[in-house]
Image (cartoon, rainbow, N blue to C red):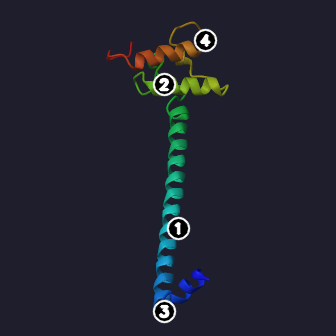
Amino acid sequence: SRALEDLMRAPVPTKEGDNEFRDELRAHAARLRWRRLRRRTAAAGAAAAAVVVSALLVFGDDQPGGPVSLAGDVTGDGRIDVRDAYVIQYRIDHGEPAPQNGDRDGDGAIDAQDVRIILDAAVSLSEDGQ
């Protein structure tokens, strides 16, 4: 009964108050929809960029018949870097043939040992990656 008395004493909302409250709710809902849309768009854009970069790293630069490069420079950019190791490891993991100049240790097989040697060369301080 006390709760009912308190409810009876509560102010009665006005039509203007209801309209203001409704407008605030609509504006809030619109902001939430906009935020969700921005998050989805950003996530989709980031995923698309990652796919493009991965494709360029793996398939971009090592065209057959191109100029001869350093052993281990599978991207053909004239230097040995992490991209070269990534391309070889990706192709090994996916059962694809690795570029022939990926045989950095000269044992006739392109394998994880070549990837390790290329990574070591990529972080070395020498200019030629040797």
Image vertical order of residue 38 relative to residue 125, above or below: below
Secondary structure at badge 1 equals helix
The circle drawn on residue 113 is: none
Residue under label 1, please give it: 33
Disc 4 from disc 2: Cα separation = 16 Å
Q: Amino acid at mark 2?
A: Asp
What amino acid does circle 1 point to?
Arg
Q: The C terminus appears in which quarter of the rendering?
A: top left
Q: Position of residue 59 (x, y in %)?
A: 55, 34
Return the disc, 4 or 1, that comes first in the chain's sequence: 1
Dot 2 corresponds to which residue?
A: 84
Residue 23's x, y, as percent? Answer: 48, 82
Residue 47 against residue 108 in the figure, above or below: below
Q: To which residue does mark 3 refer?
A: 14
Where does label 4 land, which residue?
Answer: 109
Q: CA distance from mark 2 to mark 1?
A: 43 Å
Alpha carbon separation for disc pair 3 and 4: 82 Å
Callout 2–callout 1 Cβ contact below 8 Å: no
Residue at the spot x=51%, y=91% of the render?
12
Quadrant including the N terminus: bottom right
Q: What kind of element bears circle 3?
A: loop
Give the label, 3 or 1, closer to the camera: 3
Quarter of the view holding residue 70:
top left
- Give residue 15's position: percent from left, percent from top: 50, 93
How many C-alpha atoms fall within 10 Å of the one at disc 3: few (<14), some, or many (≥20)? few
Instruction: Look at the numbered discs 3 and 1 and tell me whether their residues touch, using CB distance below 8 Å.
Output: no
Helix, strand or loop at disc 4?
Answer: loop
User: Distance from label 4 to label 1 (Cα)?
Assistant: 54 Å
Please indicate, yes or no, whether residue 97 appears anywhere in the rendered image.
no
